[in-house]
Image (cartoon, rainbow, N blue to C red):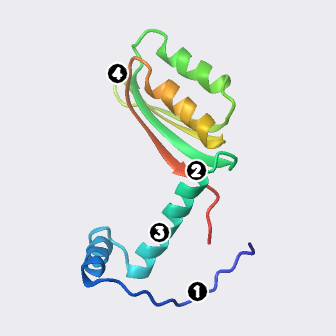
Amino acid sequence: MPENNELARVTVSLPEGLLHELDKRFIDQGYASRSELVRDMIREKLVEERWADEQEEVFGVLTISYDHHQRGLTEKINHIQHHSYINVLCTTHVHLDHHHCLETIIVRGKPDEIEQLVTKIGGMRGVRFSKLTRASIPSM
């Protein structure tokens, strides 16, 4: 599909209650217009569909926080990243305090392979928080 930044105007008919919910969201979430909110909702749905296709290459950011005093945890996290079937593109490691670290791990691969990595790391003893943000090559 060729990139085209021209905007096309569409008309959508909605029940008043649904329109009220849409307006509430765009105001509450700080959007400049309904159109911006609807575009983001459509993009989010497209990312979901790409993640549902097991053959699609997708991207994600795994955010974890953990207790670095947990014996062997840092080494295990690194080992999993080095021996996974997905591409770890980048990691960022931040020391939050004397005991806790925060990492972001940017990954590329097939959805099920990324999910396996997330499950392995997120389920480890000492990992306090684990969340995957799903992404894909954006649509216009």
Task: Tell which circle, 2 or 1, labels the residue nearer the N-terminal end.
Answer: 1
Residue 47 is situated, as x and y percent measured from the top left of the image, at: 55, 58
Side of 126 relative to 62 (left or right): left
Residue at the spot x=56%, y=30% of the render? 117
Residue 114 is situated, as x and y percent measured from the top left of the image, at: 59, 37
Q: What residue type is labelled 3?
A: Asp
Q: What residue type is labelled 2?
A: Trp
Q: Which residue lies furthest to the right in this view?
A: 2
Q: Which amino acid does label 1 sit on?
A: Leu
In what element is the residue under mark 4? loop
What label does residue 132 carry, if any?
A: none
Q: How far apart are marks 2 and 1 (CA)?
A: 26 Å
* Mark 1 vs mark 4: in front: 1
Q: Name the residue under label 3.
A: 40
Please state which of residues 34 and 91 is positioned toward the viewer in this rendering. 34
Q: Name the residue under label 4.
A: 98
Q: Mark 2 points at which residue?
A: 51
